[in-house]
Image (cartoon, rainbow, N blue to C red):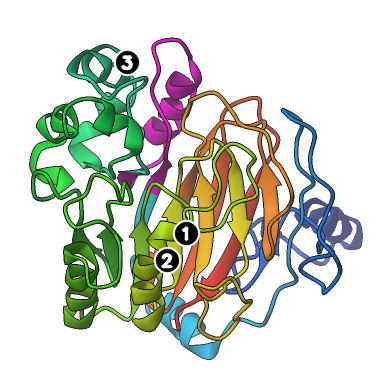
Amino acid sequence: MWISRCAAALLAVTLTACSAAPDDRPGNASGGTPSPAASGGGPQAASPAGSPAPATGTPGVTRPEATAQAEAAGATPAVLIGAGDIASCESTGDSRTLALLQRFPGTVFTLGDNAYPNGSRTNFARCYGPTWGRAKARTRPAVGNHEYHSGSARPYFDYFGAAAGPRGKGYYSYDAGAWHVVVLNTVCSEVPGGCGKGSAQERWLRADLAGSAAACTVAMVHHPLFTSAATHPPATETRPLVQALYDAGAELLMAGHNHVYERFAPQTPAGRRDTARGIREIVAGTGGAERYPFGRTAANSERRNNTTYGVVRLTLRPGWYRWDFLPVPGGSFTDTGTGRCH
């Protein structure tokens, strides 16, 4: 649309410049049309295996005054960029997504299954190291189930060191600008105590969130609670952790495990749409591993793709956030939008 505005300005000879800035108002999402599920209709048809899922989006809302004031004050945003399901010596997808990490600044996050097939020392050295390993100095990782194929994920903890949090636990937190970031271990059969209500990790999470002074929170996990992908079902065993996030007013939940991109509307841990306090989940298992087919479209799913490698860039400012799915060169799928903190 900005091209047409510039053309009109040139014809009128009344303007001297045109703005090409994207619409970054909180609540706006570009690149699609409302889905039947999002607008109150029935579920969409399943996508054929290996085919692109239908792209959908949501209409925008007016930017709040607080956001405009924050921008006017020149608040410097924190930038997080990454994906999950990344490096395999049998694929070049991770090399292609690495090019995006090298192009854009920010803290790199991983969403688990970092080195295929077994998260071994050899896999990290020969597959992950030559690609995403080049961004290791600015990476904060999450652990996935493939890491546990090798002795309690020891090679993972050895490779990332202190950046992976306490050895053996796989959950930790840090601050990124005005935001709080929690990284959880959703390999519930392996993390000490599991993921259930009252588990060591769930108690830690509640205490960590209660002790944070940040007004906005994003969580990084491997297994998604909500998904439309056909390969792995929703990880319902993680619901107590998502409940703790919801109770504390968290905004975003980033996940991998299914090798697709999928964005959900804000919702409760039970999967009910909640525009006031809901958590927006984004599945980004698009770091380089083989891609998965979609099945039946899950409730509140707004945008999906299973043909494009890429990374998600999160731009985090006081009071609001923006997400951008950045495709590898040659990819045409994108997804962009903004939201407000609770």
Which label sits in the foreground, 2 or 3? Answer: 2
**Sequence order check, earlier mark of 2 and 3:** 3
Which residue position is annotated with label 3? 127
* Count of numbered marks: 3
Residue beneath disc 2: 239
SS label for mark 2: helix
At mark 3, the secondary structure is helix
Residue under circle 1?
Answer: 236
What is the C-alpha distance between the residues marked 2 and 1? 5 Å
Could you tell me if residue 284 is visible in this image? yes
Q: Amino acid under label 3?
A: Cys
For the magenta stretch, what is the residue range? 81-109
As shown in the figure, which amino acid type bears the numbered disc 2? Arg
Q: Are marks 2 and 1 in contact (CB under 8 Å)?
A: yes
- Residue at position x 65%, y 25% from top? 330
Residue at 59% x, 71% y: name it: 271
The amino acid at mark 1 is Thr
Q: Residue 317: x percent and y percent?
A: 39, 70
Position of 171 compared to 78: left or right?
Answer: left
Task: Check the picture and name the quadrant holding the N terminus.
Answer: bottom right
